[in-house]
Amino acid sequence: MNFCDECGSMMRTAGDTWVCGSCENEEPRDAQAEAAMTTQDEQQDDGAPPVVDGTENANETMENSCPAEGCDGSRAYYETRPKPGGSYEVRVFTCVECGHTWRGS
């Protein structure tokens, strides 16, 4: 993959030249430079990254009554998460007593 020096767009190959799809700038191909480019064939998939439990080993809690039926817990771990597609964050609570999770208002 090569990027245009003029406009920064991705270029495509056309014979012995690189051609910019945006501004039509042309640059000669360099076989040595292209050989050094990484391909997906050389990459490996290590799988999904590990998901960290925000309540694991957490010792900061706050006073917050658990809304779970039958639980009278009054303390909860908390973490702040971005709202999907939103412009603000939400606080997620986990009850210290029963482990019930709920979103703060």
Image (cartoon, helix red, strand yellow):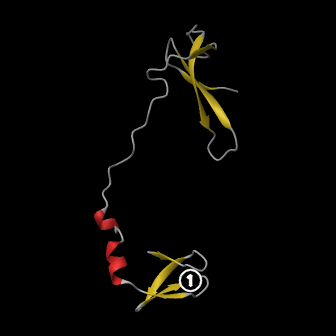
The C terminus, quarter of image:
top right
Amino acid under label 1? Answer: Gly
Dividing the picture into quadrants, the one containing residue 25 is bottom right
Image position, residue 67 (x, y; %) = 62, 16
Point out residue 47 in the picture as x, y percentages from the top left corner: 34, 49
Residue 32 horizontal side relative to residue 90, left or right = left
Q: Residue at x 65, y 33 (%)?
A: 90
Q: Is the residue marked by circle 1 packed among few (<14), some (14-19), or many (20+) residues within 10 Å?
A: few
State the residue at coordinates (69%, 39%).
88
Q: Quadrant of the N terminus?
A: bottom left
Q: Kindly give the residue lying farthest to the top in the view shown.
A: 72
Which residue shows up at 49% across the image and 20% down it? 58
Could you say where residue 23 lies in the image, as x and y percent from the top left? 61, 85
Q: Residue at 49% of width from left, 14% of height from top?
A: 98
Q: Nearer the viewer, residue 78 or 25?
A: 25
As displayed, is residue 49 above or below residue 76? Answer: below
Q: Secondary structure at mark 1?
A: loop
